[in-house]
Amino acid sequence: MAAPPFLRIKYWVLRHGKSIPNERGLIVSSMENGTHPENQLAAEGIDQARQAGELFKKELQEIGIPIEDVRICYSPFSRTTHTAKVVASVLNLPFEGPQCKVMEDLRERYFGPSFELQSHDKYAEIWALDEKDPFMLPAGGESVADVVSRLARTIAAIESEFEGCSILVVSHGDPLQILQTILKAAKQHSGSGCDDIAIRIQAVKVPTILSQHRKCALLTGELRAVA
């Protein structure tokens, strides 16, 4: 028997535009550093966010979703907040209004103090660890499984609060690739026969699935519809 649908909302994900830390080749993953104004979008990232907003607007028009039914949920980091603001302006949505909501659990994956403010080249070490064991913590940081737990809470909250809406999730590379991975796997999972989001995601929270999250990677400023 086919698994019941477990998402009542249509989702798009958007990775933030190129940020100032991206240009500098630095990992900025802590809340303290990530929310600092100096770590917002670079000029190229603003252009990317604007282009993503235009593409999103076009896709909404093509499938007949009115702007008043759209909600933007975004990470509190400067680069994601900046991206969400640009997209909201393209859609002519008041950023301080009810259609835009900051959600702390959409924040960047914290890679730990040994990686914070280090070179982007060190991402390769993290992803190699993820592939070997996605439940293993980078020293002082979050594992893939840790990120899954907070993203599951986020999706459950969105489904409860914004039923009948279409959602743009503005977040970061690792959280968004992890989110896509678990939603795809949960959609395909029929063993539970359950439409409870938390149960479906928990059922696919296994190493063989979580270790593959890099297959869902996004470029900066890349918009993607999520089935």
Image (tube, grey):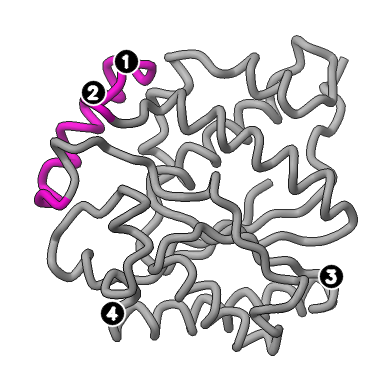
Q: Which residue is mark 3?
A: 69
- Position of 67 relative to 188 (above/below): below
The quadrant holding residue 34 is: bottom left
* Residue 26 seen: yes
What segment is highlighted magenta in the picture? 117-140
Identify the residue shown where x is 49% and y is 60%.
76
Q: Of all residues shown, which one is farthest toward the top?
A: 191
Q: Which residue is mark 1?
A: 133
Is residue 12 on the magenta stretch?
Answer: no
User: Which element carries disc 3, helix, strand or loop?
Assistant: helix
User: Which element carries disc 4, helix, strand or loop?
Assistant: loop
The answer to which of 11 and 116 lies nearer the viewer is 116
Residue 6, horizontal then vertical, whole percent: 80, 33
- Quadrant in which the N terminus is drawn: top right
Q: Which mark is residue 42?
A: 4
The kind of residue tagged 1 is Asp
Upstream in sequence: badge 1 or badge 3:
3
Q: Residues within 10 Å of mark 4 (few under 14, many from 20)?
A: some
Q: Residues within 10 Å of mark 3 (few under 14, many from 20)?
A: few
Is disc 1 in contact with disc 2, using a CB cutoff of under 8 Å? yes
Is disc 4 in contact with disc 3, using a CB cutoff of under 8 Å? no
Identify the residue shown where x is 67% and y is 26%.
186
The answer to which of 141 and 135 lies nearer the viewer is 141
User: As drawn, is 129 to the left or to the right of 30?
Assistant: left
The kind of residue tagged 2 is Leu
Q: Which residue is mark 2?
A: 129
